[in-house]
Amino acid sequence: MNIALIIIIVVAIIVAIVSGLNAALQWLLWVALIVGVIALIAFLFRVISGRNRT
């Protein structure tokens, strides 16, 4: 597993929680969700590609 992707996912979740508590920074929620989805897709792509290569 790529440590950088895991860190990005964790940071995205933390930002989503924090922005969810503050309505004035609601745009951060969307940014966190987008970054989290991109990181999750990249992580899953690496896992699937790794299985196909072995």
Image: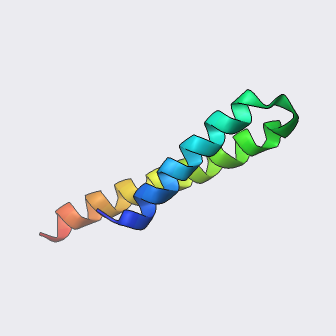
Res 33 seen here: no
Residue toward you, 36 or 13? 13
Could you tell me which quadrant the N terminus lies in?
Answer: bottom left
Task: Give the mark count.
Answer: 0
Q: How far from the left and from the top, in percent, is residue 40?
A: 45, 51
Q: Residue at x 33, y 63 (%)?
A: 46
- Residue 33 image-quadrant placement: top right
Q: Residue at x 55, y 51 (%)?
A: 11
| Left or right placement of residue 19 versus residue 54 in this view | right
Could you tell me which quadrant the C terminus lies in?
Answer: bottom left
Q: How far from the left and from the top, in percent, is residue 32?
A: 65, 46
Q: How far from the left and from the top, in percent, is residue 5?
A: 44, 61
- Residue 6 image-quadrant placement: bottom left
Q: Residue at x 34, y 66 (%)?
A: 2
| Left or right placement of residue 22 versus residue 52 in this view | right
Q: How far from the left and from the top, in percent, is residue 3?
A: 37, 64
Eyeballing the image, is 20 above or below 12?
above
| Left or right placement of residue 45 versus residue 30 in this view | left
Residue toward you, 34 or 22? 22
Residue toward you, 17 or 46? 17
Q: Residue furthest bottom?
A: 53
Eyeballing the image, is 36 above or below 42?
above
Res 52 seen here: yes
